[in-house]
Image: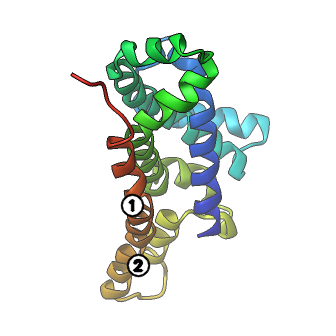
Amino acid sequence: MAGSILITGGSGTLGKALAPLLIAEGWTVRRAAILLAIPLFVFFTRIGLRGSLIGLIIVYASQTVPVTIHMLRSYFNSIPESLEESATLEGCNRFQVMRYISIPLAMPAIMSTGLVVFMIAWNEFLFALLSLVDKGGSWTVSLGLSQLAKSTIEVPTTVVMAGAVILTVPVIALFFLTDPLLVEGLTAGAEKG
């Protein structure tokens, strides 16, 4: 579970850090993960990152950055330019406009995008299987649950299903923790008619 939290947090943070840089370049196309599985497996084996959490964080970030860019770009484009122009007329520089106007208005989109990115990384199985199957201590929770179901000892189906339900608890908890931020951003400010 610690591996899942580290990988999810690392990929989400890296994805959020890279998204503004890549929006300007137009990187909005998400590639199918299965097409990249074998080349990434071979590449990470050659450079020594196969079986490491850093390699998996890089893969997860590369999967979630396009989703993040696509979701946030459309939301930032929907913010009226007149709000930003008004702040500029009041003496705000570009950084202050982003900090006091754009980011508070986009907080619902940022939080919902963060939740989507978290769920993508939390539930991802293919790359975790290819990368970490040999390293039992670093397994993600989805990989651990699948290995439990395939173990040589007989594990009752009810135990596996209970594990699947427990896997959803962090996602539900995160949703309830971020719910006030989702609603707060909706009422952060608006243009007067």
Picture coordinates of residue 7, whole percent (x, y) = 62, 53
How is colour applied across the structure in the image? rainbow
Q: Earlier in the sequence, mark 2 or mark 1?
A: 2
Mark 2 and mark 1: span between their CA atoms?
A: 20 Å
- The quadrant of the picture occupied by the N terminus is bottom right
- Tag 2 and tag 1, C-beta contact below 8 Å: no
At x 57%, y 53%, the residue is 8
Identify residue for label 2: 163
Work out whether residue 34 can be spotted: no
Q: Tell me if I can see residue 183 in this picture.
A: yes
In the rendering, which numbered label is found on residue 175?
Answer: 1
The kind of residue on which mark 1 rests is Phe
Secondary structure at numbered mark 1: helix
Q: Measuring from the top left, give residue 33's x and y in whole percent.
A: 44, 35
Lateral position of residue 159 relative to residue 137, left or right: left
The image quadrant of residue 91 is top right
